[in-house]
Amino acid sequence: MLRWSRQLDYGKPAPDFVLPDTDGTMRPLREFAAPALLVAFICNHCPVVLHMIDGLSAFAREYRPLGVEVVAISSNWPDEFPEDDYPHMQAFARERNLPFPYLHDESQDVALAYNAICTPDFFLYGPDRRLFYAGQFCASRPRLPHPPVPGAPPQRTDVAVTGEDMRRAADALLAGAPAPQPQVPSAGCSIKWRPGKDPSWG
């Protein structure tokens, strides 16, 4: 099911976490000390994630020297899509040569704390780790079988993945400028919640 990011909590601090990466190393939020931090909720199977993952990797490589760290988190319960489980996450990170940590939120508590709802869902934080930007990576989308969502922004299937919106936000943050407006919500597959965990907004 196609979902739109909730775009909540602007100005609020990043919720804390300690999660394992695909090497099994526990990675706490405090470890990421760059001036800016992009937390991206992704998964292995979502066609929207697969469409933009190389662009996200390019962004991470380009902006790391400028002061932006990227960390990706998968919170999907894998019953419906077994390719989202931890061993497949390990293979995905290795095969895609991801230039950022890919963390496993098995309990889904971190997704709940961040108010994540879809994959991909993006949260960009400044040096004070307060939420600066929570919009789309860019307007490019794969062709999906879903019908248009009433009232939603148009989805561009005819443009390349550039990360234009995220680059504009990161550039503003690094320059000490206000966050760009409007912030168009991200769109993608719904997070797959474990039984009994599904939030009212999930």
Image (cartoon, rainbow, N blue to C red):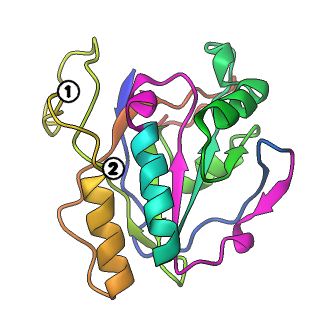
Q: Circle 1 — which element?
A: loop
Q: Which amino acid does label 2 sit on?
A: Phe
Q: What residue type is labelled 1?
A: Val
Q: Residue at x 49, y 48 (%)?
A: 57
Q: Which residue is drawn at 60% across and 51% down?
A: 99
Q: How crowded is mark 1: few (under 14 residues within 10 Å), some or many (20 or more)?
A: few
Q: How far apart are marks 1 and 2 (CA)?
A: 19 Å
Label 2 near label 1: C-beta < 8 Å? Answer: no
Q: In this picture, which residue range is highlighted in magenta?
A: 24-52
Locate residue 166, reporting x and y percent.
33, 59
Position of 159 relative to 81 (above/below): below
Circle 2 residue: 137
- In this view, the mark in front (1 or 2): 2
Q: Is residue 126 left or right of residue 4?
A: right
Between 144 and 80, the residue placed more toward the observer is 144
Quarter of the image with the N terminus in it = top left
Q: Which residue is drawn at 23% across and 52% down?
A: 184
The magenta stretch spans residue 108: no
Locate residue 63, reporting x and y percent.
45, 67
Pick whichever of labels 1 and 2 is earlier in the sequence.
2
Q: Which mark is residue 149?
A: 1
Position of 134 relative to 186 (above/below): below
Q: Circle 2 — which element?
A: loop
Outermost bottom residue: 176
